[in-house]
Amino acid sequence: MPTMTAAGVELAYTRQGTGDPVVLVAGLGGEGKGWGSQIESFAQDFDTIVPDHPGTGASGHTESYTLEHHARALADLITGLGTGPAHIVGSSTGGAIAQIMALDHPATVCSISLVSSWARADDFFRHQFAVRKDTLLRLGSAAYAETTALFLFSPTFFRDHYDKVRAWADSASGGDASVMAARIDMIMAHDQLDRLPGISCPTLVLVGSADGCTPPHLSEEVAAAIPDAEYVEIDGGHLIYKEDPAEFHRVVREFIDRH
């Protein structure tokens, strides 16, 4: 994978396709490959850039686990690649990063699609991630992945496609527990709700109706705070781009096409 120095970190990324630039920003795990088939789908029509977050995947180590640093790194990547402002599609933690990019680095952003995201932790969010972090540190990454799967997939998808859930849990069971713990602390600290009215770029807020990680009320709160934001709810859990990839792609693609 090519890399570029961005905000003091060697940021790894893939790039394929031609057209307007789209940046797919992954969730808490941080690795761009987690977008799966969406990468090829977007690359059919767009210059599709998929980074690994600082400190994850093939990107370089970082001591700065803050979403502000992650946003600055992605802004530097877009500037360094010379693509001009990009459409940012961020899932979960990626959506939190996209919020900060739109607020602090608006020249790099054409539109933002905030998928399964949030702007301020509530008691459910804090309790969930406290339990997940405790599981990670006491029982290890395999138990953490097993627990996390319960929050990321809807119950019906879990029932009907357990092989895919099993494959996800197996792929997520490795990694450095201390890094993931730092990343959990990073997202727990995210609080941009009062700043969201300052976002001026076109915004899509998309969530699964059965999202058990960042429930729809958190997305509703985000959409209500951003001027003229579009709110869309579709069937599925937190990883709606995996549960219903065609519908997810249709909604985001039509939004990007309008802007």
Image: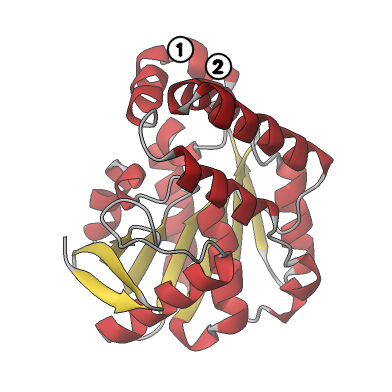
Q: Neighbour class for label 1 at 10 Å: few (<14), some, many (≥20)?
A: few
Q: Nearer the viewer, residue 235 or 80?
A: 80
Q: Which residue is mark 2?
A: 156
- The location of residue 1, given as percent across then percent down, is 16, 60
**Location of mark 1 (residue):** 160
Q: Nearer the viewer, residue 254 or 197?
A: 197
Instruction: Inspect the image, locate mark 1, and give the three-letter code of the amino acid beneath it.
Output: Asp
Question: What residue appears at the point 48 percent right and 77 percent down from the top-left corner?
Answer: 72
How are the residues colored?
A: secondary structure
- The residue lying at 29 percent from left, 47 percent from top is 33
Give amino acid for label 2.
Thr
Position of residue 38 relative to residue 15, above or below, is above
* Whether label 2 touches label 1, CB < 8 Å: yes
Q: Which mark is residue 185?
A: none
Q: Is residue 236 visible?
A: no
Res 97 → quadrant: bottom right
Residue 128 showing in the rendered view: yes
Where does the image place residue 202, in percent across and percent down from the top left?
58, 74
Say what secondary structure mark 2 lies in: helix
- Judging depth in this view, the residue of 60 and 88 nearest the camera is 60
